[in-house]
Structure formats: structure tokens, C-alpha cells
Image: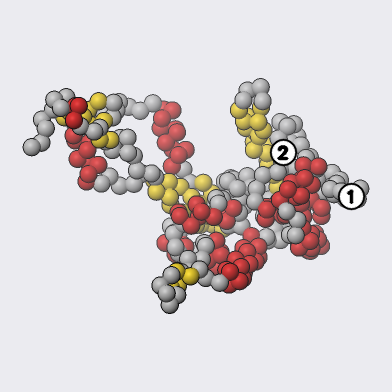
Amino acid sequence: GICQGLKLKLGLIWCSLCVSRLVPIPTSASCKMPKENRFEVEYAKSNMSTCRVCMAKIPKEALRIGHFQVEPPLLENDRTAQEAAGAGEEKEEKDASNEDKRMDAISNATRWHHFECFPRMKGQKWMDKNLPSKPSSMGGFAKIKKADQKKLEKMWTAMLSDKTPATSSSSGALKRPAAAGETASKKAKKDTLAELTSPQGVLSDKDYKKVQKNESELSSMNAAQLRNELDLNKQVLSGKKEELVQRVAEGRALGALPRCPRCEKGRIHWSRIGGWHSCPGYYDKDLGATKRCYFRSKDVKRGKWKRSGKSKSK
């Protein structure tokens, strides 16, 4: 029969009458479901939002993609577990502190990205696991222009990995798709993303051609070589290879960005989409934490660019 000695202790359901024979069963409190990822797309309502990838401002009316998380709906077995755990009692103080409310708001807030920066928001595995199969399921998709809908669909296809099922041989063993076919598909997707995420932005026609030429030449370099040249010029070192290539290409064409003039320690980020320079801050060794900086400007004087292994500079 059902034991009548069930009690809640330290987040576990256990039996006070026959505890030696029962294995503790976690309640919903200790088996909390992960938050659901949601996405939306729209035209920026102002120029106040910041891209969470490049940390530059998103211009008003620019196409932007948002990501936020929500709590999953409560399942019936969760409710049952809560009742068994004494959900009728006051589980929390009704009046949450202002700090708790503030942190909840931050956790659930939409994090915006330039359309061009969105593919670099997370790694490939995360994208494959959390992105909807089609962008049409995103909030706001039906409200954007048809041309932008097609552009978004094109980018979505290029972002998600191919999921070609393995075929069976005559012996019944599974066969992997041809490596050459996979390589061709990956290259085509890479080229598509490069086309969609490397816009001219505020660059002049002359500078844009220089940057494109540099990107083509730099594509054969590995990440370590690219970071070495960035470090030589005291530039931002983080990011995927595509970001490093773009950063070095822009540096060779336009010059090296200086240290942040506000905090004097942070490394400046620049986005050609809106032309904004920004500083997210720097790591303070004495404090053992990152000190935030809110520097934003379109007017920053660049210096000479040094090429690794060469004396030639801009």
C-alpha cells in the first residue's frame, strides 16, 4: 500500500516509518526543468539597444534578432509533487525583494543582436539544439518585409547543420554521406553566411573593397596567426576565426583601434553596421572581477597597423 509517513525534508520526499527501505525521490524543486529559448525579429524601435555579440549600438529601423528565455509550463506531475511536498504551505515569501525582481527581469529580458551578428551568438551545437527549424515560427516574422523574410530564411538554412540521415548498405550497415558532399555543403553555407554577415555598412566603396580583398587573403591563415597579429596591435582577441579574419581585415584597411579613452584599459569594439565604437570593460586583477565601461562613440582616431612578421604598417 501507500506509505502514510511521507514528509518533505531538504527537497527530498522520504518516509519516516520505513526510511531504511526507501530511496530518496527528488521533487520538482530539485529537478527544475530548463528554461525554454524563444526568438523574435523586428526593426529596432530606437538606436538605444546594444548588440550582445559586437557590443555596438543597433541603429534605429535596422533588422534585429532577439533571444530570451521563459519558464516552461508546469506539468501535471510537477503539481502532484508540489502537493506532496506541501505546496499548500507558504513556499516563499509573497513579497520578493526588489533585487530578486530585478534579477528576474534581467534573466527574462530580450537580448538583441544585429542581423549580421546573430550567427555568432552561440556555437553550432547550441544553435542546432535550440533554434526553431524555420524562422517563420519566430515572433514578429510576419511583420517584417518580404525581402527581409527571404534573407532571414536564407541565413537560417546556412546556420543549421545538415541532418542528412545515414543510408543503409546491402549488408544492412549504415553508411555515412560522402565526405566530398559534406565539404561542398559546408563551404556553400559558409559562403552564404559570409555574404549575409559582411555588409558594407558605413565603409566607403574604396575601404569596403580593401576589406574584402584582405578577408580573401587572410582566410588561409589559422586562428593562432590571426590572434598574434591582433595582439601585436592590442586589439580584441576573442571570437571565431571568421570574426578574427574580419577584425584583422578591417585593421589593415583602416588602422588600429586605441585603448578605451574612458576607462583607459578596455579594448574597443567597432561595428561597421552603425559605425559605433564601444568598450564593454576590462578584467581587474586586483578585484578579481570585470569592471564595466559604457563608452560609446562614432569618433575614434585609429593608429598605425602592424603586420605580424613584417615591418610594413598602415
Report the residue that reaches farthest toward the top. 286
**Which residue is painted at 35% across and 28% down in the image?**
96
Q: Residue 298 carries which label?
A: none
User: Residue 288, percent across and down?
Assistant: 62, 25
Dot 1: element = loop
Q: Which of 17 and 96 is in front in this view?
A: 17
Q: Taking the image as drawn, is residue 153 in sight? A: no
* Left or right of 201, for residue 90: left
Can you identify the residue that label 1 sits on? 310
Q: Which amino acid does label 2 sit on?
A: Arg
**Which residue is painted at 27% across and 45% down in the image?**
74
Q: Is residue 275 above or below residue 259?
A: below
Report the residue that reaches farthest toward the bottom. 170
Q: Do the residues labelled 2 and 1 touch (CB within 8 Å)?
A: no
Q: What residue type is labelled 1?
A: Lys
* Left or right of 125, for residue 94: left
**Which residue is painted at 47% across and 66% down in the image?**
163
Q: Taking the image as drawn, is residue 54 in sight? A: yes
In this view, the mark in front (2 or 1): 1
Q: Residue 267 carries which label?
A: 2
Report the residue that reaches farthest toward the left. 1
- The image quarter containing residue 258 is top right
Task: Estimate how packed mark 1 is, as few (under 14), some (14 to 19) or many (20 or more) residues with alpha carbons within 10 Å.
Answer: few
Dot 2: element = loop
Whichever of callouts 2 and 1 sits on the residue coming sooner in the sequence is 2
